[in-house]
Amino acid sequence: MGTPELVRALRAVLAGRPGQGALEVHYQPVVGVADGAPLGAEALVRWCHPRLGMLSPDTFIPVAECAGLGQRLDDHVLRTALAQLARWDAEGLRLHRIGVNLGRSSLHAAGLVDSVHRAGELAGTTPDRLMLEVVEHDELELTPGRLAALQALADADVTLALDDFGAGHAGVGLLSRLPFGVLKLDRSLLPGPHRVVAPAAPDSRAVLRGVVALAESVGVEITAEGIETPVHRELVAGLGVPHAQGWLYAPAMPAAAFAAWWQVRVAAVAAAT
């Protein structure tokens, strides 16, 4: 499917018209590194297309941004995730908070603060249960108005997270300009076959140690992303990273599968203590 066709189909899905499948929000657990106890989740959108199957966000989010649909997509995920959080609360499954990605269009939108508050009011959730993850691989133009909007969200107890730290433009410069409460370490910082380096490159553990020290010095929490092996887990545990997510624990799952996983994990942690 070419880009124009993909845009038309995505526009139809966001408008609720039939025939182009449906957007699904899946949830990847965030756990405590020390004991694996479940703490929260990151909401990640998927597109279940009738002909192409399950499309990953990398397939259609850049298309949505270029077509001016990014804000509508983010708003759909935000409302869906907060409504699901409220349903889990009612079922006795209590997440500390849920993370939702915030793309370029949403960051630049004049009504960002109102949109976030409105989504929380509709779901009946409080701002402290939401984490907005700033995902930015192109340099942001942070005008005074945009800085004020993000500060207003932080002042309202919404947690801001710098996602994919160590990749693209998600670096120290951005960390020093916004009121982040969480720094999420990109998987590219972890050792492994996915990481091609020069023979004389610095040891990845030393780099990670420096990043952890940086986060601690500015008073932000740390979550390690892309934890896929016990070696990764032991590495971040040894560095004092408190929270993690990745395939070692669980992939992103539909809501029902996530709830089942959560209950099993809670029971396993309780039995081990």
Image (cartoon, rainbow, N blue to C red):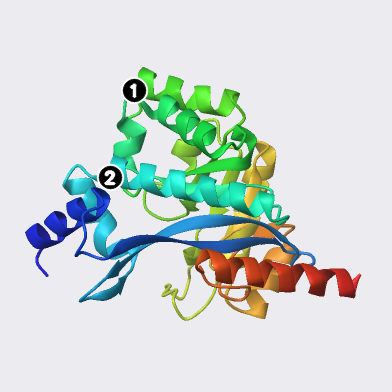
Give the amino acid type for the residue marked by disc 1 in the picture: Thr
Q: Residues within 10 Å of mark 1 (few under 14, many from 20)?
A: few
The label on residue 143 is 1
Disc 2: which residue = 70
Rendered view: 45 above or below 256: above
* Res 104 seen here: yes
In the picture, the quarter occupied by the C terminus is: bottom right
Q: Which residue is drawn at 68% across and 50% down?
A: 90
Camera-side residue: 266 or 14? 14
Rendered view: 151 above or below 213: above
Quadrant housing residue 179: top right
Q: Residue at x 72, y 68 (%)?
A: 263
Q: What element carries label 1?
A: loop
Would residue 199 appear left or right of 141 to someone viewing this image? right
Residue 192: x and y, percent?
52, 78
Rendered view: 235 above or below 79: below
Give the amino acid type for the residue marked by disc 2 in the picture: Gly
Query: Which residue is the extreme one toward the right?
Result: 273
Camera-side residue: 2 or 235? 2
The label on residue 172 is none
* Res 95 seen here: no
Question: Label 2, label 1: how many angstroms apart (C-alpha)?
Answer: 19 Å
Is there CB contact under 8 Å for labels 2 and 1? no
In the picture, the quarter occupied by the N terminus is: bottom left
